[in-house]
Image: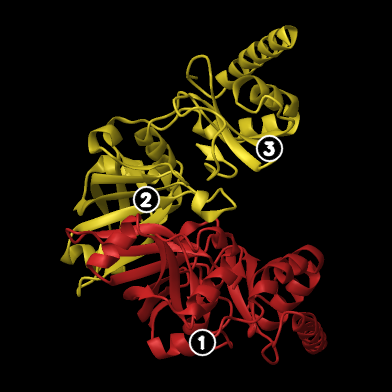
Chain colours: A red, B yellow
Amino acid sequence: MTRNHGPSKELPLTDDDVAAPSHAERARTLVAGERTGALGTLTDDGFPYPSYVTFALFEGDPVFLVSQMASHTHNLEGDDRASLLVSEDVADDPLANGRVTLVGRCRPTDAVEVREAFLMRHPEASYYVDFKDFGFYRLAVDRIRYIGGYGRMSWVEAEAWQAARPDPIAESARGIIDHMNEDHADALVAYAQAFTRATWAERATMTAVDRFGFELSVETDDGPRPARIAFDTPLVEGPDARAAMVALLKRARAQLASSQGEA
Amino acid sequence: MTRNHGPSKELPLTDDDVAAPSHAERARTLVAGERTGALGTLTDDGFPYPSYVTFALFEGDPVFLVSQMASHTHNLEGDDRASLLVSEDVADDPLANGRVTLVGRCRPTDAVEVREAFLMRHPEASYYVDFKDFGFYRLAVDRIRYIGGYGRMSWVEAEAWQAARPDPIAESARGIIDHMNEDHADALVAYAQAFTRATWAERATMTAVDRFGFELSVETDDGPRPARIAFDTPLVEGPDARAAMVALLKRARAQLASSQGEA
């Protein structure tokens, strides 16, 4: 999930039941899209201690390559309770950024699959992975807190987290958004007029896209307001977006022409 | 402190005793330059729980405007032990980024100065600051962990943290670095030849600048290596950088001419 401004705190122009990723999928997509986070551990005297870490996901659990010299490693040796906070950094308004906190116990592992998953995500780590004071840890995720920005938050069930997969179009999202905003302002206005309550819309910006649909920020007299529009069917991969957008535009224009005929 | 690549993990081309900001000053500068961080609190069952927060600094302590509905507020009501992690996001290599963890007890405050400090840093919060479920907290900093990237780390004394001031040229640093790299590649090479062990340097990039001096990444046959060069006297404000750079360049060229004369 990529967006310019995050979910708005303003009243939406569409209903809540437009098809959208589950919070589990949104959380999983967000975490899969980042490589660093804040690992919370406990100091000897029981203070929570977040440190900056690199991580990879392995079977839904964050895995870390840590130095024996690091504070968090010392802390984990004393108490394995831990959490990882992963945040986006895409919105101008900081609190519109999505973030996920993964809570569980974090323990050493020498599973070769963990090593492979970490090095695939962090090839730059290959030069120190075999230093003898470095080792892998795995945080067994037990509780998941998802905050998608204003008014979009929940505790995600561990089973739902484990089952969820990152949105397959997440890596294409930025390109789709930029393309639509730069070259297809007219289509965005047509979507807004046909599929949201802003039938008089004159200006709309795409803020997010996922396999189920996309989000607009529509200019109104009361300022920008968000809207969500679903694709006819969920996309399987990024390149499907073009045909889905064209099909929606055709439907939007037919609907606008028909309602003009009625007027 | 602003830089492209952070302190390198490679062997430096200058001695360690070149004038530089203290770790207290570096940490204070880094924290003053950011507006968001990871606030670590403790869950009811004692797990460390980092959440994404906005903060401002007030007399060296981070202050927060939090909702009664937020997990961290619930956690702080149960246990006031807390930490704030603040990280830069400037380096391509994530572990070259600087970061600071501030540890202490975090308690509610209704001091009007805290409110003012927070709103000055976060004017966008003015629309919810008076909502009745929002209130201010202040983290009384007791321990300070500074990691400036590879091989630059320490625990900073609380007194040193409180006494330190952010580098007065921090806000100009990005502009100075870009200007030198774009328009004065020849000067950077002269500095490298005259003031570092790379007397044969042909290419150097400025990676950081602070009131005491600047850092170069110098191309060598073994890859890039870092160097630090001090100004003749510490700068008082950003605009002083130009004269200081020119003075150093004059000295570098004189020194290079004299050593060529000797050869």
Residue B16, given in percent of the width and then of the height, sits at 46, 29
Query: Around disc 2, counting alpha carbons within 10 Å, would you say few (fewer than 14), some (14 to 19), or many (20 or more)?
Result: many
Q: Residue placed at 25% from the left, 49% from the top?
A: B138
Question: Vertical placement of B3 versus B202: above or below?
Answer: below
Q: Are marks 2 and 1 on the same chain?
A: no
Image coordinates for residue B197, horizontal then vertical, percent: 61, 26
Identify residue for label 3: B220
Tell me the chain of label 2: B
Mark 2 against mark 3, which lies toward the viewer?
A: 3
Which amino acid is tagged 2? Phe
Callouts 2 and 3 in the same chain: yes
According to the picture, the residue beneath numbered tag 2 turns out to be B55
Mark 2 or 1, which is nearer the eye? 1
Q: Which residue is mark 1?
A: A164
Q: Quadrant of residue B58?
A: top left
Image coordinates for residue B251, horizontal then vertical, percent: 63, 11
